[in-house]
Amino acid sequence: MMVTTAAWAVVMLLLLPWPCARIRQGNLYGHVTGRMLMWILGNPIKLEGLENLKTRGIFICNHASPLDIFLVMWLAPTGTVGIAKKEIIWYPLFGQLYVLANHLRIDRSNPAAAIESMKEVARAVNKNNLSLILFPEGTRSKTGRLLPFKKGFVHTALQTRLPVVPMVVTGTHLAWRKNSLRVRPAPLTVKVLPPIRTDRWEEERIDEYVEMVHSLYADSLPDSQKPLEPVATGKKSS
């Protein structure tokens, strides 16, 4: 990781005047590094529905382990940008590469700032003909069970009218447990569900859409990762 990150950081610096080229290089970095890491770790991986990644969209993924990030980096199509809290720039090396790759950051200090940040994200996605990847839970699940979704992905869908493409990841919480540096040989599955059209979504039904997509995830996950509490929507927009 350190070697590939350092190498691509040099490439990104050389491409500073060309932001779109930096996005493509960031995706190439993710494809190479994500795939290489998963090969080194050796976890059995089952991939389903990869044909659903061939369209522009808002790709969303449940989050229970750092492995989710590497899987998404590997599988996200070229022309996809990530979204993270603005403080990521302070993460050693990786944070700087994230910014150099022209990925997007949001301000989550309060709901109003988060909503405005998501509007800026939508404008950037539309202007540059991009796709977007984000984790709608807003944080990592400590147990692997699905957390409530925040509303940011729906706000972005309403402004871009891109389809929402769910990526359902299972098993990563068993492979790389919370507060552990050991990666276990647990089998992993990534299932990409068919795109959900958003061109007729209405702003007054935001909570309904969040609940609908959350329920789709709950139905697609094994019992060990289903939410224990009733479906609930998040209060923030990121």
Image (cartoon, rainbow, N blue to C red):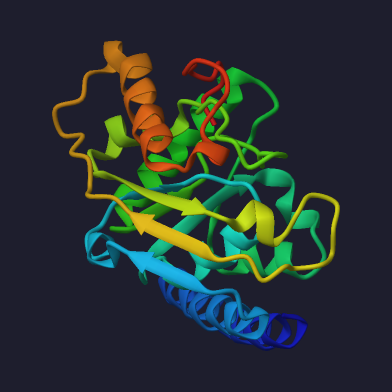
The answer to whether residue 202 is above or below residue 163 is above
Left or right, 202 with respect to 43, comes to left
Q: In this orientation, which residue lies closer to the viewer: 197 or 214?
A: 214
Left or right, 180 with respect to 145, comes to right
Q: Position of residue 59 (x, y in %)?
A: 38, 50
Please say whether residue 18 is visible from this viewpoint: no
Q: Residue furthest left?
A: 200
Please say whether residue 163 is visible from this viewpoint: yes
Q: Residue furthest top?
A: 204
Q: Quadrant of residue 182?
A: bottom right
Left or right, 62 with respect to 110, comes to left
Give the residue drawn at x 74%, y 88%.
3
Q: In this orientation, which residue lies closer to the viewer: 165 or 142?
A: 142
Q: Quadrant of residue 33?
A: bottom right
Q: Position of residue 221 (x, y in %)?
A: 44, 42
Give the residue drawn at x 59%, y 77%.
38
Give the residue drawn at x 63%, y 64%.
98
The answer to whether residue 229 is above or below residue 215 is above
Q: In this orientation, which residue lies closer to the viewer: 8 or 139?
A: 139
Quadrant where the N terminus lies? bottom right
Quadrant where the C terminus lies? top right
Q: Position of residue 96 (x, y in %)?
A: 72, 66
Q: Position of residue 220 (x, y in %)?
A: 37, 41
